[in-house]
Image (cartoon, rainbow, N blue to C red):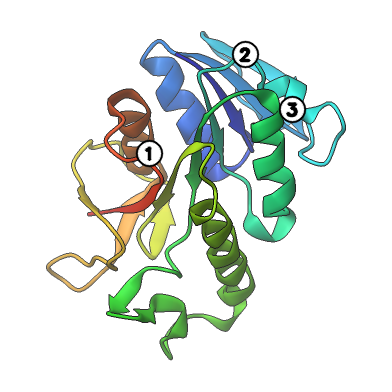
Amino acid sequence: MKVAVVGASGRGGSRIVAELARRGHQVTAIARNIEKVEPGPNITVRRGDVNGLGFPGLLAGHDAVVSAVRFVQTDPDVLIGAVRKSGVTRYAVMGGAGSLEVAPGKRLLDTPQFPEAAKPEALKGVAFLDKLKATTDLDWVFLSPAAVIAFGERTGKFRLGKDEFMTDADGKSKISFEDYAVAMVDELEQHKHSRERFAVAY
């Protein structure tokens, strides 16, 4: 496939770019700071800003767009609108864990232990997901990671869920950026979810 990755210089975006490239997909790695993007085979680096007038043109001609930008730095209407204008219909979004449910109707971000500093990003992520749920002309997916996501190993072993907050046998909720990327690229290749959110955790 030809896949455009927005936010390619970030922690999640960089690993998604690497995973796509290692599987032989043609990746357009889009970032404002292209010097932070790791070059390599199957990777074309392009400078781009989601608020720029020419941004939809950077996305055009791809089979899918992956968004791995922070929600507090983007306007969902602008980003979703750019994908729509580009003519690309498959859209995968790197989501957050805050909107996952710890109980029916109770989100992780509503629990007392949720870090106050993380709430602005989590709330923006909720708003982004709500915008996607109202979008019917794009084949979108929103992949939420575990509560703790950090650089680590690429094991290829993890669990997938829907809207529920997942923990391991020790009560911890975690995933590596590397395995998150595996789950994201698996979805792009296998297309098991459409217009819905799903989650990944160990």
Amino acid at circle 3: Pro
Disc 3 packing (10 Å; few <14; some 14–19; many ≥20): many
The local secondary structure at tag 3 comes to helix
Q: Is 188 positioned to the left or the right of 27 in the image?
A: left
Q: Are marks 1 and 2 in contact (CB under 8 Å)?
A: no
**Left or right of 150, for residue 48:** right
| Residue placed most toward the observer, 57 or 41 | 57
Q: Amino acid at mark 1?
A: Glu
Q: Position of residue 164 (x, y in %)?
A: 27, 67
Q: Is residue 180 left or right of residue 168?
A: right
**Tag nearer the camera, 1 or 2:** 2
Residue at the spot 18% in from the left edge and 41% down from the top edge: 157
Mark 1 and mark 2 lie on one chain; the one further toward the N terminus is 2
Q: Residue furthest bottom?
A: 112
Give the image location of residue 117, x and y in percent. Answer: 61, 77
Amino acid type of disc 2? Gly
| Residue at the spot of label 3 | 56
**What element does badge 2 sit on?**
loop
Residue denoted by label 1: 178
How much space separates mark 3 and mark 2, taking CA atoms? 10 Å
Q: Earlier in the sequence, mark 3 or mark 2?
A: 3
Q: Toward which corner of the image does residue 60 lie, by quadrant?
A: top right
Assess disc 2: are there few (<14), some (14-19) or many (≥20) residues with their C-alpha within 10 Å of its C-alpha.
Answer: few
The residue positioned 25% from the left and 69% from the top of the image is: 172
| Foreground tag (3 vs 1) | 3
Nearer to the camera, 144 or 193: 193
Q: Quadrant of residue 11?
A: top right
Q: Which residue is mark 2?
A: 61
Q: Give the class, few, some or many, for how many residues have Cα within 10 Å of label 1's Cα (few <14, many ≥20).
A: many
Mark 1 lies on a secondary structure that is helix
The residue lying furthest to the left in this view is 169
